[in-house]
Image: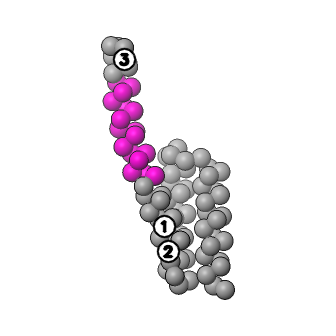
Amino acid sequence: MQRHKSVEKRVRTSKKANLVNRANRSRIRSTVRKVTEATDKESADNALKEAISVLDKNVKFGTIHKNKAANQKSRLAKLVNKIDK
């Protein structure tokens, strides 16, 4: 690694961003898992609302791409709609 001030600062900021992104991705996985494990319609709807919110926030932060979030929201909505039947 080069010994420049800018490189050293970039390493520090990258480590911070890595921690934040890791926490955000973990939160996404947790909320998505809540939706997939929901058994009744009401809890699934509540979990879906929370998951959509978390996905949209992470798109805003730049953690995930907007199309990935859209695909996940669509897949989860289909899953929740199947519970009703």
- Disc 3 secondary structure class: loop
| Depicted 6 relative to depicted 65: above or below | above
What amino acid is labelled 1 in the image?
Arg
Query: Which residue lies at the image location 65% right of the left edge and 58% below the top edge?
Result: 71
Residue type pointed to by label 3: Met
Instruction: Determine which residue is flagged by label 1.
Output: 33
Tell me the element at label 2.
Answer: helix
Q: Are marks 1 and 3 in contact (CB under 8 Å)?
A: no
In which quadrant of the rendered view does residue 12 lie? top left
Q: Main secondary structure of the magenta part?
A: helix
Q: Is residue 53 above or below residue 15?
A: below
**Real-space CA distance between mark 1 and mark 3, rounded to the nearest whole angstrom:** 40 Å
Q: Earlier in the sequence, mark 3 or mark 2?
A: 3
| Cα–Cα span, label 1 and label 2 | 6 Å
Q: Which residues are magenta?
A: 9-25
Where is mark 2, residue-wise?
37
Q: Position of residue 28 (x, y in %)?
A: 48, 58
The furthest residue to the top: 3
- Residue named by callout 3: 1
* Quarter in which the C terminus is drawn: bottom right
Q: Is residue 34 left or right of residue 65?
A: left
Kindly tell me whether residue 47 is visible in this rendering.
no
Rate crowding at label 1 as few (under 14), some (14 to 19) or many (20 or more) other CA atoms within 10 Å: some
Q: Position of residue 32 (x, y in %)?
A: 51, 64
Q: Are marks 1 and 2 in contact (CB under 8 Å)?
A: yes
Query: Helix or strand or loop: what does disc 1 sit on?
Result: helix
- Residue at image location 36% in from the left, 14% down from the top: 2
Percent across and percent down for residue 48 are: 54, 70
How far apart marks 3 and 2 lie (CA) works out to: 45 Å
